[in-house]
Image (cartoon, rainbow, N blue to C red):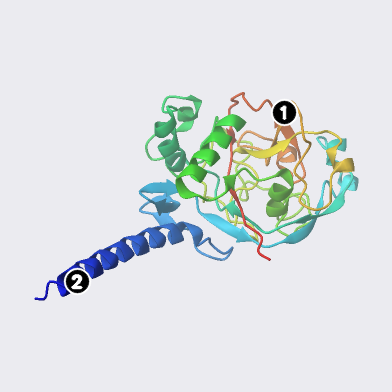
Amino acid sequence: MSKKILPLLILLVVVCFTSQVNSQEKASTSLLIMVSKPADKPLKVGEFFGIKFNDILVPETVALTKGVFKRGFHNPNLGCQECSRDEQPVKEITVSAFELGRFEVTNAQYEVFAKASGRENADWVKFYTRGKENYPVANVSWSDAQAYCAWLQSITGREYRLPTEAEWEYAARAASTTVYPNGNELTGSEANFNRSGPDRVDKYKPNRFGIYNMIGNVWEWCSDWYGEFYYSESPEIDPQGPSTGQYRVLRGGGWSSAPDLCRVSNRFWHNPGFILEGRGFRVAVSIKKTN
């Protein structure tokens, strides 16, 4: 073999090997980037809900298109013990396209982060025993939820975050204008409320957007600061909440909540650093706008 040809062959082998490695890395990344549609069947890795990325179980997200909804409590004539002035005025809000977790973040998904961040023995393990990997993580603070999103972002390169309060209500309503996603009454066959503990994230039927458990099961942290009169002054396109505050927003009600607290317009709040029983979250992902 010519001495001139041999180096060319070696270079060709190196180029082919490098190309194959890069292709494998892109394929691995694309598994995460390929988000689900509302009608798709929930994804699993073995018995656990989620997607595998570099041997890490991450939440499945559903792509939600840009839309308009009426934010706030629509039906004051129904009579509501817990209805508050912070749910008024009702206003049309536009939400840009984004991705939202099909389920609340599960114990199995959070456990990987907990081990990586020294949270193995924190409060969240109170409701976690083997066999409950597909239950929502509970007893986490807003700060814990933010740290989880930042950790996911550092590993995947995707813009994981908590949903804004407006995004949360848009997804919870799923084009409805009723008190609850499926009507003005709530039954035990539709959500986990007035009970003693969390349940599987897939136990109840999804809403029209293919999202599960937007009401009941665990209270869900949002990114916003809470403002009692924010609805009167907020922008009508992609509101992000007040610029400052003392408390962060929680939505959706939890397993021990009365029906009134599970209304899609109901707003709650708490100290972002405190851990209270039954607080969980789901992730959102920003979709970059293209020109």
Q: Is residue 283 in view?
A: no
Using a 10 Å C-alpha cutoff, classify the residue at mark 1 as few (fewer than 14 neighbours), some (14 to 19) or many (20 or more): some
Residue visible at 84% across and 44% down in the picture: 234
Which numbered marker is on residue 9? 2
Which numbered marker is on residue 218? none
Q: Is residue 285 left or right of residue 225?
A: left
Quarter of the image where one finds residue 262: top right
Residue visible at 50% across and 49% down in the picture: 157
Q: Position of residue 117 (x, y in %)?
A: 44, 30
Q: For the C terminus, give its image quadrant.
A: bottom right
Q: Secondary structure at mark 2?
A: helix
Quarter of the image where one finds residue 270: top right
Residue visible at 44% across and 37% down in the picture: 113
Amino acid type at image mark 2:
Leu
The residue at the far front in this view is: 4
Using a 10 Å C-alpha cutoff, classify the residue at mark 2 as few (fewer than 14 neighbours), some (14 to 19) or many (20 or more): few
Q: Position of residue 62 (x, y in %)?
A: 57, 58
Specify which label sits upstream in the sequence, 1 or 2: 2
Residue on which the image places disc 1: 247
- In front of the other: 232 or 206: 232
In space, the residues marked 1 and 2 are separated at their CA atoms by: 64 Å
Please tell me whether residue 66 is drawn above or below residue 56 in the rendered image.
below
Q: Is residue 38 in view?
A: yes
Q: Position of residue 251 (x, y in %)?
A: 69, 40
Circles 1, 2 touching at the beta carbon (< 8 Å) = no
Q: Position of residue 102 (x, y in %)?
A: 56, 53
Please tell me whether residue 13 is drawn above or below residue 129 in the rendered image.
below
- In front of the other: 81 or 243: 243
Q: Secondary structure at mark 1?
A: loop
Amino acid type at image mark 1:
Tyr
- In front of the other: 180 or 114: 114
